[in-house]
Structures are given as structure tokens and as C-alpha cells.
């Protein structure tokens, strides 16, 4: 069986993170949505996505395919029900299309048509689903726990070093090649997963549930509170709470990151702080690209959502409920506005458009620092985002 992930219905609501990746590659918990599905399916997947992303994320067609909604969190019940699908049968939950078994010639962007398919199978599972940006935060702590069990089942952790101080060591899993210094880890209220090649330095404090990705560095004296996911090859210092860093990003110094999501290849300057609570405790509104307006999240804790390749200078202050696009460069004193479009350059005194070639040059240099190549395909994706988001830059 061939498995293809899609997510068109929620895609625009999850911008800016879906500007340069399919929804399937959003990280929630320790793993991305794709990695979760592939663990359950025990198979590789490809993606039905936007045409401009197709070169980077090509779709594989075979004679017999199952399309799966990558915004839905997998579980054993869903896996069993997907396995029961007959050809041309659809698995649904209310108005949510979960999966559809289809021949290669019938694959297309046809969610609404499939919802009206004859003889749908109605799931018995309780659905957890990404739809809005803030769902990443709402689902993250539970997903850390679920991913921990998915990754560590019937496996044995490397021993906790004697020089580390750990409470609840039975809930700490250290992959081979990870290093843990004289750190303090409290896993009594939730597990802590430390991936291979990660380095938890001396004096770091981690409270579970928490996930530390492959090759990530938790720097000396960092305070990592529960509900935090640090993606692969990221560097984190200072204070982090209930937040997700997708990967290859740096928050290496002091400063507070709370109830926030940071994309890949971002850099957060020293002493940058994100507000995640209004002083009057009002519910927080957040920019939604699909609605092209601010929407009420229903949350009192909601921080900053920073798209890939964006950067901020030292001592930056982000307002409660801020959305920053792709390849923005932000600096200067004072609270920033709470919607900053892609390829914006500036501060509270005003923004201009960041030169595209300079943005690409910065991306290429950051890749080189991690011994990676910034490919022509990735440049074409950034170019598409640059052109697509021109209208938003006129708003600020």
C-alpha cells in the first residue's frame, strides 16, 4: 500500500509555517506529523501539496493508494480503521476527511468531493487535529508524552550519568550518542526524551514533559519548563516554556520564550522576550492568514509564532499573540506590532521590504554554518513566498 499525506483544508490557517513545507512536516511534540504517521504505518509517505512545493516534496503514486489527512494526529484506532478501507471508501469524522483509498488516476485535490462519497466509514476514534496556529501549543504537551512512548517502547535508555541530578529516572530516555552534563532533570510529572547527538550542558534544568531533538544543545543554565519541544540541531538558552522550536534555529542566550512556535533557520537575539499573557488577562487574538484578520484564540496564554528564516536583534520585545512571516528581520527597542509580514525589515518605527537576494544570502550562510547546502529548489520556494506575500507588506 502507498500512503500519501495531504492537508489542504487547514493549510492556510497554519501559515506562515506551511509557506515552505507541507502541513505534514509541522512538528508537534517530539516528532513531526509525518514522522508520527510513518511510525504508525511502518512505511514511508509522500505528499499531495501546493504546486510550488512539489519539486521539494514530490508525490509518489502507485496502483493502490491511501490519502491521509496529515492534520489529524494518528493513533492505533485510526490505523486499524484505515486498514479496513475498501477501494474508493472514505474514512470521516463529521466534516473532517481522515483518509481515502484511491487509484492513482483519481488522486487530486478533492477533499469536498470525498466527503460526499458513497458509503463512508465513520471513525470511532477521538480526533485530535491541527487547524489553527495555536493548536500546535494546545497539543504539544500531550504529544510529547505520546511520542515518548512511541519512540521508546521496548527499548532501553542509555544510563543517566551519575553527575546529573534526576527525579523520575524511569521517565528519562537518553539515546546513544547524547551527552548530559551536570544537569537537573525532573521527570516526575512527565517524560523527558533526549535524542542522539543532543547535548544537555552543565546547570541546565529540564522539567518534563519535554523533548530534546537530535543534535540539539541545551546550554548552560537554561530553564526548560514542561511542554517544550526543541527540534533537531537547535540551540537553546535562557527560559523556555510550553513552546516548540521546529529545528536548526537558535535561541542561544537569556530571554523568555513562552507559548510560542519558532520555525526552522531562525535566530533570536540575546535577551529577547515574548509576552504570552496580557496584563488584563484578556483572551488573545492572533493573525490568521486564511481569514486575513485577527481571530480570538480563546486562550489567555499565547506568545509568538515566527516563520522560517526570520531573525530578531538583541533585546527584542514581542507582543502577546504575535505572528511573524518568513525571512523577516526585526530589531530595535519597544514592543513590535503583532503581525509582521514575510520579508519585512525594520522595527517599531517602521518596516521596509527586505531585499530578496540578501535574504537568500543570509539563508545560504546559515546553512553553511550547519554543513548543509541551500538548494536551488529551496530558493525557488522562497521566491514564491516573497512574491505571494507582497500585498501583506503594504499593510505595515
Image: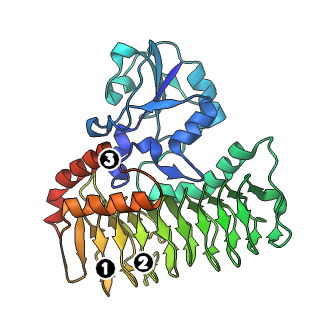
Label tally = 3
Provide residue 31's location: percent of width, then percent of height. Answer: 57, 48
**Camera-side residue of 214 and 45:** 214
- SS label for mark 2: loop
- SS label for mark 1: loop
The residue identified by callout 1 is: 331
What residue appears at the point 21 percent right and 55 percent down from the top-left corner?
386
Q: Quadrant of residue 160?
A: bottom right
Mark toward the start of the polypeptide (3 vs 2)? 2
Q: Is residue 294 above or below residue 182?
A: above
* The C terminus, quarter of image: bottom left
- The Cα atoms of the two marked residues, 3 and 2, are separated by 25 Å
Mark toward the start of the polypeptide (2 vs 1)? 2
Looking at the image, residue 109 sits to the left or right of residue 83; the answer is left
User: Would you say residue 342 is visible in this rendering?
Assistant: no
Q: Nearer the viewer, mark 3 or mark 2?
A: 3
Q: Are marks 2 and 1 in contact (CB under 8 Å)?
A: yes
Mark toward the start of the polypeptide (3 vs 1)? 1
Provide residue 64's location: percent of width, then percent of height. Answer: 47, 14
The numbered mark at residue 378 is 3
- The Cα atoms of the two marked residues, 3 and 1, are separated by 26 Å
The numbered mark at residue 269 is 2
What residue appears at the point 58 percent right and 53 percent down from the top-left corner?
29
Amino acid at each position: 500500500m502507498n500512503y500519501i499525506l495531504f492537508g489542504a483544508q487547514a493549510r492556510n490557517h497554519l501559515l506562515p509555517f506551511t509557506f515552505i513545507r507541507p502541513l505534514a512536516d509541522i512538528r508537534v511534540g517530539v516528532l513531526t506529523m509525518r514522522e508520527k504517521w510513518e511510525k504508525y504505518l511502518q512505511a514511508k509517505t509522500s505528499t499531495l501539496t501546493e504546486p510550488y512545493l512539489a519539486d521539494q516534496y514530490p508525490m509518489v503514486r502507485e496502483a493502490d493508494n491511501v490519502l491521509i489527512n496529515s492534520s489529524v494526529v494518528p493513533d492505533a484506532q485510526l490505523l486499524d480503521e484505515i486498514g479496513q478501507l475498501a477501494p474508493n471508501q472514505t474514512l470521516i469524522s463529521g466534516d473532517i476527511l481522515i483518509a481515502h483509498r484511491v487509484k492513482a488516476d483519481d488522486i487530486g485535490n478533492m477533499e469536498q468531493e470525498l466527503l460526499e462519497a458513497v458509503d463512508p466509514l465513520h471513525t470511532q476514534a477521538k480526533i485530535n487535529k491541527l487547524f489553527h496556529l495555536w493548536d500546535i501549543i494546545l497539543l504539544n504537551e500531550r504529544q510529547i508524552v505520546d511520542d515518548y512512548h512511541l519512540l521508546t517502547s521496548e527499548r532501553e535508555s542509555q544510563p543517566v550519568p551519575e553527575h546529573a541530578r534526576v527525579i523520575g529516572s524511569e521517565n528519562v530516555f537518553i539515546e546513544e550518542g547524547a551527552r548530559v552534563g551536570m544537569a537537573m532533570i525532573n521527570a516526575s510529572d512527565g517524560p523527558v526524551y533526549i535524542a542522539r547527538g543532543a547535548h544537555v550542558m552543565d546547570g541546565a534544568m529540564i522539567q518534563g514533559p519535554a523533548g530534546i531533538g537530535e543534535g540539539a544543545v541545551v546550554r548552560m543554565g537554561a530553564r526548560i519548563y514542561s511542554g517544550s519541544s526543541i527540534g533537531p540541531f537547535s540551540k537553546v538558552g535562557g527560559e523556555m516554556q510550553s513552546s516548540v522550536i521546529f529545528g536548526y534555529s537558535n535561541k542561544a542566550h537569556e530571554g523568555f520564550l513562552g507559548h510560542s512556535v519558532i520555525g526552522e533557520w531562525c535566530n533570536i537575539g540575546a535577551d529577547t522576550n515574548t509576552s504570552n499573557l496580557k496584563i488584563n488577562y484578556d483572551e488573545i487574538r492572533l493573525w490568521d492568514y486564511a481569514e486575513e484578520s485577527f481571530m480570538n484564540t480563546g486562550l489567555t496564554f499565547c506568545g509568538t509564532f515566527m516563520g522560517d528564516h526570520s531573525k530578531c536583534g538583541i533585546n527584542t520585545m514581542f507582543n502577546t499573540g504575535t505572528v511573524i512571516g518568513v525571512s523577516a528581520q526585526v530589531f530595535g527597542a519597544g514592543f513590535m506590532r503583532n503581525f509582521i509580514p514575510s520579508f519585512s525589515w525594520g522595527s517599531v518605527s517602521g518596516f521596509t521590504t527586505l531585499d530578496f537576494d540578501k535574504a537568500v544570502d543570509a539563508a545560504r550562510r546559515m546553512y553553511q554554518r550547519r554543513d548543509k547546502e541551500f538548494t536551488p529548489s529551496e530558493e525557488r520556494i522562497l521566491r514564491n513566498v516573497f512574491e505571494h506575500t507582497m500585498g501583506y507588506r503594504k499593510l505595515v
